[in-house]
Image (tube, helix red, strand yellow):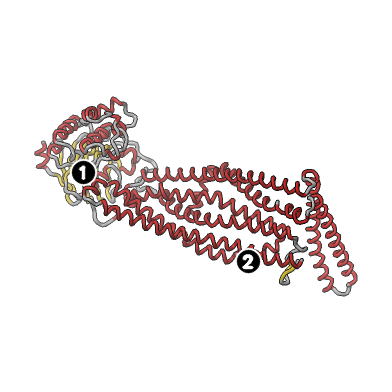
């Protein structure tokens, strides 16, 4: 609930909408109770066949008579006290009775004054004819109902707007957190977690917020308004009617606890089938190549079936709360019918030795009292759905806010060092690294100094630690021990953006956006002109196929992750993107593995033209690219070993 309250506090940014929605809720509640109370004069006129003027005159006379009777009782009690001068116990008893009579007198006088104040309004605005009076009240009820629904619609629109703005803000923050999260934390959660949080979880939270800011305030206010109306008729009878409330409260407690558990499991399964969905569609070529469509279909169906099972449990528990809450309404109404019928039929003011009312209830008053209790039952019924939604919202909030509260392990220092460009040396100092703080070192005590402008080639078997070393150089991870530095300044003393802006990385698995070729190249420098884009495309030997093969040239959409291009075309575009950054360090991680020999030769010539202008780190097994290297290192079980014979051969 703590995290859900944090989401609710976000509504303070939209305080005006929240205040207006609250005012609408109060108006709806007041009109809800007033519409029910309006039946009292209708019943009085219908049952007695008298005009409202006659009715108010009779009530004034009746209250005046009651006031006189109470005053007479008080006077009589005082005379008895004087007569019983020698009996202090009896005098105390009579004095206590006088206090009760005085309280009753105050109540009678207040009612008398209300009728007196009401009389001029009735004389002025209410017709003298009983039929016309009923017609006027019914028209007023219709108008009041329309006004109530205007307030109700306004309330729902205002609350919906606030909830959608909050969920949109959270979606933006979750996406931003995913983009800026350190790679270790991101890998621990995976794409499916963030997709589920952004798509499914925020919807759960939005629904909970809509109910918490809307119905959770509006419906209880309607209940309170009806309770106030019923208490004005007979508050003791109202207390008698709520004897079943504790039982209902206990049942609701256990149901809502179960709802919370099921909501959590539903969210977990949503992450599960989102994971299957993303994996299968993201690896569609592998799925089809290995004829595993049926397997992935079964995995997905298994996930959705489990999701269905938990959703059915949620629906069952939510529906179970409805009869429990309705039982409260029926229990209150049933208790009142029994007690009220006894009082009216026997014209009594007490029941089972308990004083229920000061004077016998009229049929009209009892019917309106019943109406007030019926008016309570509808909000109670709606609150059952509200509780389910709010509890689901608390689960969603508990999933969202820990992600938002996560602090990235890769952060800027409090006082970052400003380093000149370009750097002079890239230094790896006794660096070791293990994933997830395990004891198995992937990089084991590596030291290396790379002067600016030099070209270093790194070879090694799969899993030897080459890609991990690249991840450390780009500061996607920090070393477990040792350091990586520019000109003696540890990465951790520099801004993250300062470090990464000095690198450009071309991977074997090229990542692209479903935008134009120009967009994907310009991703390396969004401010670049068309001429600069074309220049780097020519340098990467991509210009020719872009203009001659692609239908729309640089404006051709490349498809999802570049699936409309060949592997070699994607890598040349990625190389152009890297060159557009004009990086101090260009890293090629098996970047020519999918390029034909002729294209590789052209790219090799392009890279050769840039030798000395920037540092180049080339991970490759292609001999032609090794020829570019000033020095060749091999990663063997996490250690860096220089291969002089390869360097000599390259020279």
Secondary structure at numbered mark 2 = loop
Which image quarter: residue 536?
top left
Residue 181 x %, y %: 36, 46
Q: Badge 2 is on which residue?
A: 243
Task: Give whichever of 294, 251 is nearer the camera.
Answer: 294
The residue positioned 59% from the left and 62% from the top of the image is 328
The residue positioned 89% from the left and 67% from the top of the image is 79
Q: Which label lies toward us, 2 or 1?
A: 2
**448 sits left or right of 67 in the view:** left
Residue 528 x %, y %: 32, 28
Q: Badge 1 is on which residue?
A: 448
- Above or below for 12 versus 527: below
Secondary structure at numbered mark 1 = strand
The residue positioned 18% from the left and 40% from the top of the image is 593
Q: Is residue 646 visible?
A: yes
Q: Is residue 430 visible?
A: no
**422 sits left or right of 267 in the view:** left
**Counting residues from the N terminus, which is met first, the one under dot 2 or under dot 1?**
2
């Amino acid at each position: 609930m703590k995290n859900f309250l944090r989401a609710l506090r976000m509504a303070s940014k939209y305080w005006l909408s929240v205040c207006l929605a609250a005012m609408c809720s109060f108006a709806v509640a007041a009109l809800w109770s007033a519409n029910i109370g309006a039946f009292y004069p209708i019943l009085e006129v219908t049952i007695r066949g008298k005009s409202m003027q006659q009715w108010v005159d009779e009530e004034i006379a009746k209250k005046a008579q009651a006031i006189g009777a109470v005053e007479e009782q008080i006077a009589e009690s005082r005379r008895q006290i004087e007569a019983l001068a020698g009996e202090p116990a009896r005098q105390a008893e009579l004095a206590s009775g006088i206090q009760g009579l005085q309280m009753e007198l105050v109540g009678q006088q207040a009612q008398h004054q209300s009728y007196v104040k009401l009389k001029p309004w009735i004389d002025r605005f209410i017709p003298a004819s009983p039929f016309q009076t009923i017609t006027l009240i019914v028209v007023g009820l219709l108008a009041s109902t329309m006004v109530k629904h205007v307030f109700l619609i306004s309330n729902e629109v205002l609350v919906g707007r606030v909830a959608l703005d909050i969920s949109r803000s959270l979606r933006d923050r979750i996406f931003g957190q995913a983009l800026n999260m350190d790679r270790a934390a991101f890998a621990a959660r995976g794409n499916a977690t963030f997709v589920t949080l952004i798509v499914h979880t925020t919807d759960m939270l939005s629904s909970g917020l809509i109910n918490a800011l809307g119905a959770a305030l509006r419906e209880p206010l309607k209940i309170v308004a009806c309770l106030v109306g019923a208490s004005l008729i007979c508050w003791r009878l109202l207390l008698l009617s709520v004897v079943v409330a504790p039982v209902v409260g206990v049942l609701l407690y256990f149901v809502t606890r179960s709802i919370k558990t099921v909501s959590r499991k539903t969210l977990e399964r949503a992450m599960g089938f989102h994971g299957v969905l993303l994996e299968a569609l993201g690896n569609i070529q592998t799925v089809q190549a290995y004829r595993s469509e049926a397997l992935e279909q079964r995995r997905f169906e298994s996930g959705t079936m489990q999701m269905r099972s938990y959703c059915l449990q949620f629906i069952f528990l939510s529906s179970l709360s409805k009869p429990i809450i309705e039982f409260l309404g029926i229990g209150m109404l049933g208790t009142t019918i029994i007690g009220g019928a006894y009082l009216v039929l026997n014209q009594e003011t007490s029941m089972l030795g308990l004083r229920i009312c000061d004077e016998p209830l009229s049929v009209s008053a009892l019917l309106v009292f019943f109406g007030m209790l019926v008016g309570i039952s509808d909000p109670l019924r709606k609150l059952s759905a509200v509780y389910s939604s709010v509890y689901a919202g608390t689960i969603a909030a508990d999933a969202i806010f820990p992600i938002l509260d996560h602090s990235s392990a890769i952060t800027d220092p409090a006082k970052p060092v400003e380093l000149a460009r370009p750097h002079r040396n890239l230094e790896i100092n006794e660096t070791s690294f293990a994933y997830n703080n395990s004891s198995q070192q992937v990089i084991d005590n590596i030291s290396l100094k790379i002067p600016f402008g030099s070209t270093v080639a790194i070879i090694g078997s799969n899993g030897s630690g080459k890609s991990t070393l690249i991840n450390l150089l780009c500061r996607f991870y920090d070393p477990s021990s040792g350091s990586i530095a520019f000109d003696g300044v540890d990465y951790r003393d520099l801004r993250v953006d300062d470090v990464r802006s000095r690198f450009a990385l071309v991977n074997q698995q090229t990542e692209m956006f479903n935008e134009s070729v120009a967009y994907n190249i310009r991703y390396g420098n969004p401010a670049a002109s068309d001429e600069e884009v074309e220049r780097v495309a020519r340098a990467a030997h991509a210009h020719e196929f872009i203009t001659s093969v692609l239908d729309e040239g640089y404006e051709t959409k490349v498809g999802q992750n570049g699936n409309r291009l060949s592997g070699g075309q994607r890598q040349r575009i990625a190389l152009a993107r890297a060159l557009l950054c004009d990086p101090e360090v260009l890293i090629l991680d098996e970047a020519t593995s999918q390029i034909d020999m002729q294209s590789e030769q052209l790219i090799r010539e392009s890279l050769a033209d840039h030798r000395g202008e920037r540092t180049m780190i080339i991970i490759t097994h292609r001999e032609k690219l090794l020829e570019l290297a000033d020095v060749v290192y091999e990663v063997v079980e996490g250690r860096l070993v220089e291969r002089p014979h390869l360097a000599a051969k390259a020279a």
